[in-house]
Amino acid sequence: MTAPTTWMTARAASSAAAHGEEGAWLSRLRDAIDHGAHLLPAQGPIPVFIHHNTLHAFEDLPFTQAVEEAARRYGCQPYLAEERYREELERGRIRFAGLEAMLRDDLGDAADERLPPRCTRFELRLAMLQHPVRFGPTEELLWFVAETDALRHVRPATPPATRLRLIAETRRWVMRDLRGGHEAGHNGGATAGQRAAAGLSGLLERFGEARIEGWTPEQWEAFALQSLWRVCCDGAATVPECTAAPALPTRHRDLLLQTTGIDTDLRVHEVLHPYCAAFLDQGLAAWQLPLWSEGFYRAFSALYRLPGGPPDSWRWGLASELRRMEAARVGPLESIRESLDLLGVAEEEWDDYLAATLLALRGWAGMIRFLEERPDRAVHPPPPGSLVEFLAVRLVLERLALQAAARDHLGYSGPLTALRDELRKRLGTPRPHSVEQRAFLVFQLAQVLGWTPPDLHRLSEREWHTLVREIEAFSALERRRIFHLAYEGRFRFQSLDALALHAPDAETEPRTPRFQVMFCIDEREESFRRHVEELAPDAETFGIAGFYFVPMYFRGAADAHFVPLCPVVIRPRHWVVERADGCQEGAHGRRARTRRVLGRTMHQLHVGSRTFAFGALLSAVFGVLASVPLIVRTLFPRLMARLRSTCGRIILDPPATRLQLERTEAPPGSGHGPIGFTLDELTDIGERVLRDTGLTRNFARLVLTLGHGSSSINNPHESAYDCGACGGSRGGPNGRAVAQILNDPLVRQRLAARGLRIPDETVFVGGWHNTSNELVTFFDLDLLPDSHAAEFAAARGILERARERNAHERCRRFMSARLTLSFAEALQHVEGRAEDLAQVRPELGHATNALCIVGRRCRTRGLFLDRRAFLNSYDPTQDDADGAILTRILLAALPVCAGISLEYYFSTVDSPGLGCGSKLPHNITALLGVMDGAASDLRTGLPWQMVEIHEPVRILFVVETTPDIMLRILERNPGLDQLVRNQWVQLAVLDPHSSTVRLYRDGVFRDYRPQAQQLPRAQSSVDWYRGWRDHLEFAVIDPRAVPAG
Amino acid sequence: MLQAADWLNVLGLLALGAPFALVCLLGVTSLLDRKLSEAATGKLCQGASAVGLLAALGVVALMLWRGTRHEVIALGEWVVIPDYHFSVKLVFDRLSLPFAILSFLLCGTVAGFATRYMHRERGYNRFFVLYALFVLGMVLTALAGTIETLFAGWELVGLSSVLLVAFFQERPAPPRNGLRVWVVYRVSDAALLLAAIVMHHLRGEGDFYRLLGGEPWPDGHAALAGAAPLVVGVLLVIAAAGKSALAPFSGWLPRAMEGPTPSSAVFYGALSVHLGAFLLLRIGPLLEATVWLSAVVVALGLVTALYAYVVGSVQTDIKSALSFASLVQVGLIVAEIGLGFRYLALLHLIGNACLRTLQFIRAPSLLHDYHSLENALGGHLPRVGGPLGGAASSTRPWLYRFALERGYLDSLLAACVVTPFVRLFRACDALERRWTDFIAGRAAPESEAPQPYSVALEELP
């Protein structure tokens, strides 16, 4: 326990003993802080990037409610912008029929309710979806009406018949009723009639009533619109306010910002940005924060109560305030209480106020909280209680900044407790929607729905009220929600159609496959698997979570530290090291020494270039030489890469190595548990891998087990491209380990005893696939028996060709790669990307994820799934009636895939708010994350360049099982049930024995009727995707298909 | 048949003409809203840099062949009135050529980098238009033979730099920091402009060559007498201090890191920040004329270097750390100039520019590099520790805080210069309003006091 915490607790305990009620506020305050803290972003340090649901804190709410609540809390977007959806509607990505269906479904029985003047609720809402409804400040609308064609020409979207009717009806109304003075109106008898006549008579006069019979059609059109506008204004004027005014913000700063335009957070953050970074720094700065070990609060106090600070007037009181607190021994929690009292925040408000205060600097605060909870994720984790201390410091600074700003910009020198009241008084009540704003809504809709001025004129006040309320109820947010459902629906139908219509082809199912390959379930491997199968129809592939159920802390022969290789929810209990092969230990030692010397030199240069004398020597004497790597690396990245890898081979990689998987005792004092797994544990792993994938018979002579990872340079988010199932690291060691386990004769013996007989002639080879440069590397090839050499060479040849094709398929999504690249050129292109310093999109990561299929490969084999589907192998025919295997598969796959999908979703719908914006101004800070430019909050989420082509949809899980089993699994696993029931993921089941698909909704599965008759067919993948950049429909790849054209 | 002298003229003009043509091409197409494609823009920028570089190298070759150390291309007079003329002159000597070659080399490389780095960025075209302006400004400054030519280049560099700092204009911080840089640049520009006027006033011309005694760089002596060199010198030192972020103007340098990585790299880390040093090199003999002016320059350089070193050692983000590392060397370069080591300073300047550009464009690799270093060393990297490791424990926190808050320089400038300045003008404004109200007989309309306007998110619950 660190000093400040003991100090504080001691104080708190004594005061609690002294006054019982004071103890109560303490726990109240702790609760309030916890409540705010759980809203903070939960992203850890980015050297190991773990995908997670950005709105994890809201998972107990249904998706729609959660995103709206989060939008309010964070001030971020819940869906794409309305214009984006409308563009998608125009280009056919959202189908109009689908939109109609979704709207009808959403409205249910209320859809056909009649609304004045003459339409149904459904028609009204559909029109609002179909045609942009403009809204804006009153001044802008008045300008728009006065200065544009809005009152001269009917909206272009209006159908011609409606337009003509609008003009004709107005004309008849004017000529027959209005000029004759017979129009009394329904709303209030003669007065309304007079009013209308008075309003319109001015208009008639202006148009020249005397010549009314000689008006041109243009004049009539303008008159119709102007009268429509006036009628709308008259009508809207009678409607009382029906939407509640938005609540005023809680924080003083927000109120002050609204009143004066002065942002006190700027000042507070000017102090906190560098201080938080210095406090959390993992070793970037040469000089560590003095008194770091004393904690956030005391270190701050020690630094900032020193005399001789900057002359900023708002901070004049800081040193004395800190000295007072130090003298009175005010602990962090007490200080928070004190600040809240001084700011006039009552106890009922604590939750909201503190949450909003924490969220004002959510990146840094979130990182403090994350590292408090997971100190194993950083070298220098902050001590527990740091978030409370952060908050205490923050509130002290805020008090001072507010006091100064109120004094300087409001002339307010009263106590802070009354500041909010003063500000609220100055702001006054928020303006309700003005008459013009409401009239403009009706005006726009009237034109597309064909409501004429007489129609609207005859509405009673109550009808006007209903109409306006209906229109306002279908707000922009609601419209976006419906659009989003239709957007998702289109993809869901397309995916389910593909699975329902694709019949497994008996002939493509090999009897005894030539070779088998296991891949990670990652959707980026979907295309690789497809290409392998296209090139070798007699091969078979499997998908399994890429850590191969070998959860371990792993340290490579040339690595300094252990890294956890398993999903983040698992804390490994085993340590595995890679060691140099016995006879090569000498060579290994020599290389390690060389590396150390080189490393030390590089570090000296790195640090030294920033110092005084050494930096001078370096830049004056050798600086010019820097131009050589500068130019070569920038202009010829592949050449440089080749040079570097040649040098690297000599010094970096250790020679032949072995994984030490069998159990040995850890060296004493190493601080970790025993090395390796026991034989039983190894057998468990082997059994789990084989049973989960369904590979229990028909073993080929050669089985490859591939992990995956991604290499790129100059990319702070490099780890985000690695294997999610390996906790954001490269999964090579796991592929290697599982092959070694399954080759082990002792393990095989024990597996046989458990009823899993691996034929003696079957050999497993481990390796990893680099999803960025498409390199496939194998391990332990020296152990491969000669009898299998030829087969391995053949299989490797297939993989070589598959990686070219995979590169080719990937290149269609890169705008900087020509669509006409050959296979070899495509491979060169992706290799260049991975080595290019200037490349901000080395690969596109999970940007295409949208679907996860858990089932036998024969249900999807031969389908072009466009790299959009996580493919998890699972054979329902080998599972028991409870779905024991399925349960454990879903427990691993569902949260991981949902996390990836949702992180991409939120980083796409609001890139600057929930993602981390563009990569271009990113600046690595404290070795923990990135910030924008010179100083900003720590940015969490995914950069825009990663999600640029992503379609934000919730992931659709399709599981090959029966509804009963699935429902029972959900019932028994509340974690999965919450994600499914609250619609954070979509779920469907595919019947194991037929092509029936059932879709989950509100706790039950309902049969899904395919919308398409048949799927498009192509001879090969390349025939289907060639020449196309965008997402593609799913197709059947069938070599016997008739070539198009 | 062209003579060697003609060739020299052609090549010399080409060195300036290439970036000028680039500005025209990119600028005109942007103004006409016929923006070039990404690839074409990138190729043009690299091409222009390559042409400029080759032309400058050609000039070097010709001068070596002819054995001259000083060549001038006069482009004529812009303004001629009695006692005053504004002449545009390019000079090729041992200072201007290396600096021009450096500019072309770094700018060309960074253009290649940015073509891929900025791919699909909305402001792609804007970036390269500003880039072209920057290159033109750099080359014009490097080759300037008169102070007025130099001023033109100096202004182009300043303007384009500031707009690049504020490149990401949809966020509030970049324009705010851009404005800070702009203000400091204006102070520096004003000093340079005053120096130019004083020079014209004293000698009727702004020609460096004649001002410095008609000897090729780095030789020369001040051809001014009395207090004149001191006045001009002080003004030029102020100009250089603003541009090179010397104390007390250092606050803008880290703020300039708001732009995209390539522009921070080449512009503030490498080229822009050396421009002040370049100016001091150009007028080196003038500094020598007064001992205590040299002493001021040496002191300014050393103080800046010391300041940047102390502040740099606590920076926790890579771009700030690198910018202060660069500033340490700029300070030393300035000190070298003050001591009269001009060749050393030039070499130091070029070396620092190349090194920092490389370090800046590799800045996003930091996590990767640290990881490999840790693997090579087999453990966590040791912390180096800050300056004054042996100092008393009471001074160290003070120094740390001084460093963490970047020496309070921005606050000091704000409190001592900006606030009084603003107050003075606000007072004048208030006086004027009172006067106009008095004449009008009524209070000024409310519209003159703008209300804050914050754009709220559209209809969120």
Image (cartoon, rainbow, N blue to C red):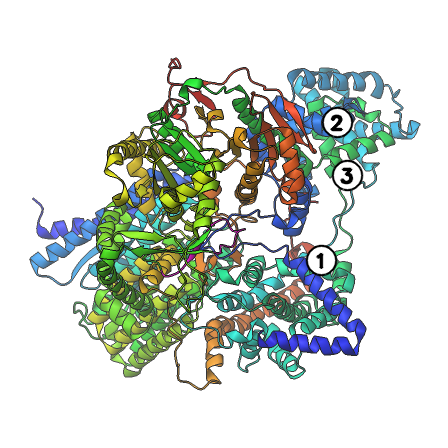
The image quarter in which residue A287 lies: bottom left
Indicate which disc, 2 or 1, sits on the residue closer to the N terminus.
2
Name the kind of residue labelled 3 in the image.
Answer: Val
Chain letter of disc 2 in the image: A
Name the kind of residue labelled 2 in the image.
Answer: Gly
**Going by the picture, which residue comes out furthest to the front?**
A753
Do we see residue A726 in this rendering?
Answer: yes
Using a 10 Å C-alpha cutoff, classify the residue at mark 1 as few (fewer than 14 neighbours), some (14 to 19) or many (20 or more): some
Do we see residue B157 in this rendering?
Answer: no
Q: Is residue B357 left or right of residue A366?
A: left
Q: Nearer the viewer, mark 3 or mark 1?
A: 1
A569 falls in the magenta region: yes
Residue depicted at 37% across the width and 34% down the height: A759
Chain letter of disc 3 in the image: A
Q: Provide the secondary structure element on which disc 1 rests.
A: helix
Q: Is residue A306 above or below residue A343?
A: below
**Observer-nearest residue: A456 or A1018?**
A1018
Indicate which disc, 3 or 1, sits on the residue closer to the N terminus.
1
Q: Which stretch is magenta?
A: A560-573
Q: Are marks 2 and 1 on the same chain?
A: yes
Name the kind of residue labelled 1 in the image.
Answer: Asp
Q: Position of residue A603 (x, y in %)?
A: 31, 66
Chain letter of disc 1 in the image: A
Q: Provide the secondary structure element on which disc 2 rests.
A: helix
Q: Position of residue A896 (x, y in %)?
A: 53, 44
Would you name the residue on which mark 2 appears? A108
Q: Is residue A1012 left or right of residue B287?
A: right
Q: Are marks 3 and 1 on the same chain?
A: yes
In the rendered view of the protein, which quadrant contains the C terminus of chain A?
Answer: top left
Using a 10 Å C-alpha cutoff, classify the residue at mark 3 as few (fewer than 14 neighbours), some (14 to 19) or many (20 or more): some
Would you name the residue on which mark 3 appears? A435
